[in-house]
Amino acid sequence: MAHLEHLNLTVRDPDAVADALCALLGWHVRWSGAAMETGRTVHVGDDAGYVALYRPAGAVTDAGSSYGVHGALNHLGIVVGDLAAAEARAQELGYVPRSHGNYEPGRRFYLDGPEGIEIELVSYE
């Protein structure tokens, strides 16, 4: 069976985004260093998978809403064991949970995370 190992996002400040994801999700930095075209990448996640945060050498531009762009990433979906604790942690860190849903197969909410990256936190318990 196949499983997702990682996904790669372009960000302005990979170290700051990695720090924010570690604080929010309890992840750790798996690797960081030089990347293609004199950029920088930080791999942040757990032992099973990670998000590669890539910063090119040049400027990073905003594309607007991803929901109308072919092939764009719309949000990160992260499974948590305790949704209430995850929401409390998000609020402690200054994020604003929204769009709460309780439908099969689980409960969830969304927030705009570091650099405006939309994150869905979901629990199947």
Image (spheres, helix red, strand yellow):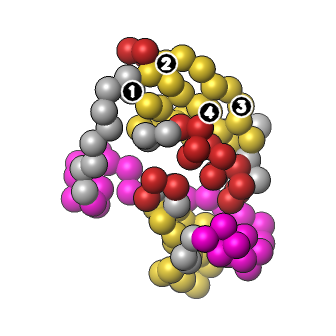
Q: Which mark is residue 35?
A: 2
Residue 16 vertical placement versus 38 (above, below): below
Crowdedness near tag 2: few (<14), some (14–19) or many (≥20) residues, C-alpha within 10 Å: some
Q: Earlier in the sequence, mark 3 or mark 4?
A: 3
SS label for mark 3? strand
Q: Which residue is mark 1?
A: 56
Q: Amino acid at mark 2?
A: Ala
The residue closer to the viewer here, 70 or 115, is: 115
Residue at (60% x, 20% y) in the render: 33
Q: For the residue marked with disc 1, what is the amino acid?
A: Pro
| Residue 27 among those drawn in magenta | no
Upstream in the sequence, badge 2 or badge 4? 2
Residue 30's label in the rendered image is: 3
Q: Regarding mark 2 in the picture, which secondary structure is present there?
A: strand
29 to 79, vertically: above or below: above
37 to the left or right of 99: left
